[in-house]
């Protein structure tokens, strides 16, 4: 029985479709821009008009290679295109150009590590990554008051990679974390924007339960494929629901894998349940055969080397590099890298200006990222630029302001930045009415306090230096701009000289 | 001489030199179409207005000294399997009746750039499936040599148009013999180029790995002239060959001495018409007299050519023709359009969509197209793929290897194009298997992806043309055209005209 004392193990494999970031479609020159008016990004090829012929977009193939290399896949030296035949109105040729028995890559893996250790590091095998063209979109137009469906073929022919994982994931939480890691990797490498709302990342999940029996053997429940999940959160919820549903069904029926056909269930996000879909999909015979309009693709070792060289650093390597370079804990590096390339760049600029990694990491996580979480937006349009933040961190570090004051100034910077005013520390300090307290002023102030607090003076003289802290609150009451550290320092100096 | 009696080479020369106007040439052919095609049915569309306008433009440009393309003023008819942006393109199918593509096929664009005058679209077997032109949804073509006989197919309209002097040159397409067989049965010259030599972009696909566009003309020299325009690399066709196009017409005039011609004994087995056999043997004798040598060669797997072809081609066709589903263009008959039952036996449908698919396809396609879609769908189905399609691919490889072996010892292989001269209309329509066998001498060329040419080598006692076929290795078009051209310098068969169509 697993350590968490669950009576079963949830076994999950994912199938992820990712739209590649190409300007043009996989087999024609049409643009792939999202959101254009229906059927405006089409040509005879992606409309499947008679006599039209596909020609492969090598840039799409190279991007797919980049993804497969980043997933540690073996790249086939020779790959081909196959036709997947089925009738549907959003598939104008009556077949989808895909890859069947010779995918361009296979046998890779991607590890996910939870920075907080919520689950053990999990290396998930990749069975295959292949390239295919997307279909169009069917829309049922209720508003028109007819039963007609409308077809938008703008998406038809857009390049997709399909990534099929091994059933190596063991919980809905792991599945979600792994998807986040996959998305991060693909976004880092510029392979895809992985925008689920725009459909550039789609996930299907296969899940069943392994139930240990008394005799040491394992019973397996029938595999269910879940579709229609439109966020990683939905994936996690759907898997959790499905595991519970299968457990309940298993206890009730005891039906094992192989005794019932593989089932497809759709996730209803609003209702929070999965629903059985028609079994018809399963019995489809796609009559795959090699597409005679296209020639096989060969991949030379030099091409692979060139793509590898131009690939940039994947998140795993970047996390280690960041921790090492700036001397920050691995968990900090993970949080920063997981935010994406722009946050890493922001962090590195701040840390470079400050000349020290840890305070920059702290401010980034506790102030910048928290603000972004609360208010939304991206680091590239964050109101506080790296130079201003670095200046602030530097001054706090040098004791010009204490941390509390620093936070107030940070808030001031935000206000200025949001108002599109110059957001530098001096301006924020001025706006907050903070004026520097001169050494003479401070000395006079502390002297007055010492006269009024003979007990503190006596305590310090008696060796209890911490008693000086009692002066700080009083000092700030008289002048909110005084630096507490300095108050303490001046007080001790004056007492020693008494 | 009347313009309609001139060869393509003569026509472009005469127009360029100002001996005759393009308008006069084009008018002569258009008039002849108007006079004869009612009984031949070679044309699905005749573009009289467009052709005359283009001819007038060419004459104007010539008079003002502007440059003219290499085919300036040459009337060319194009098989209706090729997309033309200004004319309907139907593949002789009810499915595409009235369909007008938004673009020109690559070969059509090349013809236009060369200043050829496209006079019309020629009749064919529906979606190029057939060997008699009887599968056209718009009526069969009649062989100009005997109007009761088939012209062969599927490029029957293109062949008959040339044979009856309705066009000096036409384009056809050849998937298993569709240029060479009708050329043979109609007494004209037709070239099936090497796979990839001519772009397939805009050629409506029947079987993509076999289809190839080629010229159908009065002579090998004319075919060479057309090839100089239509051949060449097209980046829009991934299977197009990126190799230079030879100046075919300049390479013709070389002696045949030393040419090694292979002769396959199996070609002369039972089933070959005796008059065809005699014509073919006489052609070998002509080549021999011209200095060629004849050698026995074997193509051991050639006898599997027809069954292999009838697996590979229908599998590709079933997939290629899936797009004609009534959803986006072409014939639609469904619940939404209040369509009547198509008599397809289907009663219960999963959805109105499936009902629309079934009715549209049942009505839009003719019986032979449906037969091949069913053959291909069956052969690609789970559990049958290995036994049929995969095995056919292995045999195809062996057939290709046979040719490579043979071409190690000979330059070209000669023989019959068709086992019989033109057969009667209706003679084979009730027996699809007999019809499939008309391709027996031609399908292997396509399976091997090599080149083949067909030209007349005699006539039967009843006056029907007999064709001779030469097959050569990949990119051997210059050699095939030269051999045929030399043959045509030594014989007069290609100059004969059907009596019923005299000028
Ligand atoms: Zn397109």
Image (cartoon, coloured by chain):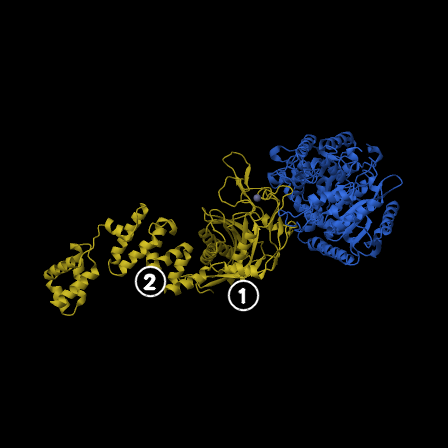
Chain colours: A yellow, B blue
**Residue A356's image quarter?**
bottom left
Q: Are marks 1 and 2 in contact (CB under 8 Å)?
A: no
Name the one closer to the observer, B179 or A83.
B179
Q: Quadrant of ligand 1?
A: top right
- The picture places residue B106, in percent across and down from the top left corner, at 65, 43
- Tell me the chain of label 1: A
Q: Position of residue B117 (x, y in %)?
A: 69, 36
The label number, if any, that marks residue B158 in the structure image: none
Residue B113 is situated, as x and y percent measured from the top left of the image, at 65, 40
Residue labelled with disc 2: A356
Task: Count all numbered tags in the image, as a single digit.
Answer: 2
| Gap between marks 1 and 2 measured at Cα | 56 Å
Q: Is residue B380 left or right of residue A196?
A: right
Pointer 1 local density, CA inside 10 Å: few below 14, some 14–19, many at least 20: few
Q: Which residue is mark 1?
A: A217
Q: Residue at x 72, y 42 (%)?
A: B128
Q: Quadrant of residue A45?
A: top right
| Helix, strand or loop for disc 1 | loop
Q: In the image shown, does A366 or A313 lie closer to the viewer?
A: A313
Which residue occupies the extreme right position in the image?
B461
- Disc 2 element: loop
For label 2, count other residues whose C-alpha is less than 10 Å away and answer few (under 14), some (14-19) or many (20+).
some
**Residue B121, located in which quarter of the rendered image?**
top right
In this rendering, which labeled residue sits more in front, label 1 or label 2?
A: 2
Q: Are marks 1 and 2 on the same chain?
A: yes
Position of the C terminus of chain A, as image quadrant, is: bottom left
The answer to whether one can see residue B391 in this image is: yes
Image coordinates for residue B93, horizontal then vertical, percent: 70, 37
Question: First in sequence: mark 1 or mark 2?
Answer: 1
Left-right relation of A27 to B361: left
Res A165 visible: no
């Amino acid at each position: 029985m697993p350590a968490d004392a669950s009576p079963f193990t949830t076994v999950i494999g994912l199938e992820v479709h990712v739209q590649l970031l190409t300007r043009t479609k996989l087999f024609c020159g049409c643009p792939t821009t999202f959101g254009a008016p229906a059927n405006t990004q089409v040509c005879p090829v992606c409309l499947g008009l008679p006599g039209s012929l596909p020609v492969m977009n090598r840039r799409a193939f190279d991007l797919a290679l980049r993804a497969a290399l980043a997933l540690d896949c073996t790249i086939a030296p020779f790959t081909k295109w196959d036709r997947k035949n089925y009738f549907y109105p959003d598939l104008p040729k009556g077949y989808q150009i895909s890859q069947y028995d010779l995918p361009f890559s296979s046998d890779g893996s991607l590890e996910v590590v939870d920075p907080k250790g919520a689950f053990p590091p999990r290396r998930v095998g990749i069975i295959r990554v292949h390239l295919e063209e997307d279909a169009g979109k069917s829309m049922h137009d209720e508003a028109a008051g007819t039963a007609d469906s409308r077809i938008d073929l703008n998406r038809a022919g857009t390049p997709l990679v399909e990534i099929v994982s091994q059933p190596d994931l063991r919980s809905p939480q792991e599945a979600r974390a792994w998807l986040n890691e996959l998305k991060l990797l693909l976004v880092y490498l510029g392979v895809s924007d992985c925008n689920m709302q725009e459909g550039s990342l789609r996930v299907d999940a296969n899940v069943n339960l392994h139930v240990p029996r008394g005799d040491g053997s394992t019973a397996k429940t029938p595999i269910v494929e879940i579709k229609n999940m439109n966020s990683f959160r939905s994936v996690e919820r759907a898997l959790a629901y499905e595991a519970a549903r299968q457990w309940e069904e298993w206890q009730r029926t005891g039906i094992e894998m192989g005794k019932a056909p593989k089932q497809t269930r759709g996730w209803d996000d609003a209702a929070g349940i999965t629903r059985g879909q028609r079994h018809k999909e399963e019995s489809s015979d796609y009559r795959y055969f090699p597409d005679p309009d296209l020639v096989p693709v060969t991949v030379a070792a030099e091409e692979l080397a060139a793509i590898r060289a131009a690939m940039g650093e994947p998140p795993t390597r970047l996390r280690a590099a960041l921790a090492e370079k700036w001397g920050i804990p691995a968990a900090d590096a993970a949080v920063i890298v997981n935010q994406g390339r722009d946050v890493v760049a922001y962090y590195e600029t701040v840390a470079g200006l400050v000349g020290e990694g840890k305070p920059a990491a702290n401010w980034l996580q506790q102030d910048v990222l928290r603000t972004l979480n609360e208010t939304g937006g991206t680091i590239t349009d964050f109101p506080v630029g790296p130079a201003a933040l670095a200046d602030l961190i530097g001054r706090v570090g040098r004791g010009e302001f204490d941390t509390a004051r620093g936070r107030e100034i940070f808030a001031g910077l935000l206000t200025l930045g949001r108002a599109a005013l110059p957001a530098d520390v001096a301006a924020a300090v001025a706006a907050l009415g903070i004026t520097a307290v001169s050494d003479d002023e401070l000395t006079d102030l502390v002297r007055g306090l010492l006269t009024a607090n003979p007990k503190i003076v006596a305590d310090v003289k008696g060796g209890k230096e911490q008693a000086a802290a009692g002066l700080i609150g009083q000092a700030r009451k008289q002048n909110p701009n005084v630096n507490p550290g300095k108050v303490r320092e001046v007080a001790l100096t004056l007492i020693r000289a008494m | 001489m009347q313009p309609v009696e001139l060869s393509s080479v003569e026509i472009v020369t005469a127009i360029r030199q100002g001996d005759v106007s393009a308008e006069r040439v084009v008018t002569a052919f258009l008039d002849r179409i108007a006079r004869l095609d009612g009984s031949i049915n070679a044309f699905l569309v005749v573009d009289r207005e467009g052709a005359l306008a283009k001819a007038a433009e060419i004459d104007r440009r010539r008079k003002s000294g502007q440059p003219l393309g290499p085919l300036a003023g040459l009337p060319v008819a194009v098989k209706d399997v090729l997309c033309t942006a200004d004319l309907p393109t139907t593949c002789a199918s009810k499915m595409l009746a009235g369909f007008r593509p938004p673009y020109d096929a690559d070969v059509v664009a090349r013809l236009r750039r060369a200043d050829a005058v496209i006079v019309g679209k020629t009749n064919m077997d529906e979606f190029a499936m057939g060997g008699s032109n009887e599968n056209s949804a718009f009526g069969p073509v009649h062989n100009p040599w005997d109007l009761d006989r088939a012209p062969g197919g599927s490029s029957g309209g293109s062949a008959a148009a040339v044979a009856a002097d309705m066009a000096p040159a036409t384009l056809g397409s050849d998937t298993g013999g569709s240029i060479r067989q009708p050329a043979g049965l109609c007494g004209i010259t037709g070239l099936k180029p090497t796979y990839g030599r001519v772009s397939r972009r805009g050629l409506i696909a029947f079987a993509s790995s076999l289809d190839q566009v080629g010229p159908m003309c009065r002579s090998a020299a004319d075919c060479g002239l057309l090839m100089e325009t239509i051949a060449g690399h097209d980046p829009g066709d991934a299977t197009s060959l990126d190799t230079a196009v030879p100046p075919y017409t300049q390479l013709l005039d070389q002696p045949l001495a030393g040419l090694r011609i292979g002769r396959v004994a199996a070609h002369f087995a039972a089933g070959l018409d005796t008059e065809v056999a005699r014509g073919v043997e006489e052609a070998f004798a002509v080549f021999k007299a011209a200095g060629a040598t004849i050698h026995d060669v074997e193509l051991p797997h050639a006898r599997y050519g027809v069954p292999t072809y009838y697996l590979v081609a229908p599998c590709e066709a079933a997939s290629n023709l899936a797009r004609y589903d009534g959803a986006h263009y072409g014939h639609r008959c469904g619940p939404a359009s209040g369509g009547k039952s198509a008599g397809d036996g289907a009663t219960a449908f999963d959805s109105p969509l499936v009902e629309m698919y079934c009715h549209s396809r049942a009505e839009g396609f003719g019986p032979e197209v449906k037969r091949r879609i069913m053959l291909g769908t069956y052969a690609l189905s789970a559990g049958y793929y290995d036994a049929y399609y995969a095995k056919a691919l292995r045999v195809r490889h062996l057939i290709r290897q046979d040719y490579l072996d043979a071409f190690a010892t000979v330059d070209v292989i000669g023989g019959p194009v068709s086992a019989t001269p033109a057969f009667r209309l209706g003679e084979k329509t009730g027996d699809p298997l007999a019809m499939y066998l008309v391709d027996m001498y031609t399908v292997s060329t396509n399976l091997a992806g090599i080149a083949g040419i067909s030209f007349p080598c005699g006539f039967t006692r009843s006056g029907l043309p007999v064709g001779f076929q030469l097959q050569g290795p990949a990119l051997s078009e210059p050699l095939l055209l030269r051999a045929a051209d030399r043959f045509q310098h030594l014989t007069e068969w290609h100059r004969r005209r059907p009596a019923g169509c005299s000028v």
